[in-house]
Amino acid sequence: MPQCLRPSRPHPGVVFALALATAAWVAPVASAAERSLLAIGAHAGDVENSSGAILARHKRLGDRVVILHMTLGEGGNPRLDPAAYAEQKKREALAAAKALGAEVIFGPFRDGQLPEGDEAVRFVADVIREVTPTHVITHWRRSIHRDHEATHRIVREALLAASLEGGYPSKLPRHRGVRGVYYAENWEDADEFRPYLYVDVGEDLAAWKAAVTCYEFVRGGISPFPYLEYYESLARVRGAEAGKRFAVALDVDPLAKKRVLDALP
């Protein structure tokens, strides 16, 4: 029971900044006192389904975990008007965050209408500056849902904006401490997604299940898609690939897929 349009060619500066950040995954693992995770999803429920088990694991390890929902996904219930479902989704998101031990931030944007201009980039850049994450998780670049693709592009631009002085005016100091940018495996974002990093979540699946079942759409009350069964089965498949009981896979930018060694391992 619960506890509770394709992307345009990116600016070279964005690619370079993300390559530097995501390449840092090969460095020694940071201590808990040095790690904080910011997971950014297009709709309430996206982050929890795709990477909630990773968030639960890092919370258990003593890390700070923050979730940013760009929209509530209030347009997804055919039996409720968007305003009523927005209230429900917000309650569910708060309960899910509590189950994961995460902080939660709600964006001001509407489901299906996520803008890709300065307003959204500035908003996310300020969240990054305020949270000062060491690791960021968000959507993969290709999706059947426009809000997912928009979130991917907004986060990429915001990472660069948050790291620079000037550009977008802000009262918050710039943040250049993002060491890893990762893309979660979502059933709607499968096009060209390639599992690259595997995180063992065998001890964290119960916390993940408690979190995601705070959402009615995951429990099966709204959509016929079997969210709970799909993501639990996917974690078993990725676990088999990684030699673990359960695991969650992430991808990174192509330029980050580089390791420099003194000799073969």
Image: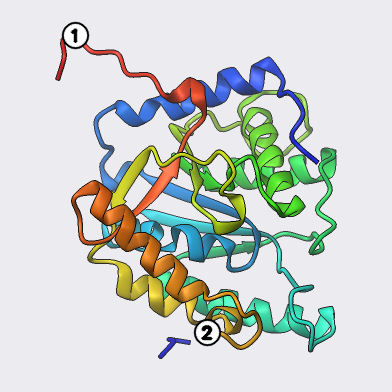
The picture places residue 227, in percent across and down from the top left corner, at 52, 72
The secondary element bearing badge 2 is classed as: helix
In the rendered image, residue 107, in percent from the top left (x then y), is placed at 72, 59
Query: Which residue is tagged 2?
Result: 219
Q: Image check: 260 left or right of 255? A: left
Local packing at callout 2 (Cα closer than 10 Å; few below 14, some 14-19, many 20+) is: some
Can residue 178 be seen here? yes
Of the two numbered discs 1 and 2 on the same chain, state the one appearing first in sequence. 2
- Callout 1 secondary element: loop
Quadrant location, the C terminus: top left
- Give the quarter of the image for residue 200: bottom left
Q: Nearer the viewer, residue 172 or 191?
A: 191
Q: Nearer the viewer, mark 1 or mark 2?
A: 2
Indicate the amino acid at tag 2: Arg
Give coordinates of residue 5: x percent, y percent: 81, 41
In this image, 125 relative to 213: left or right?
right
Residue beneath label 1, please? Answer: 262
Which amino acid type is marked by label 1?
Answer: Asp
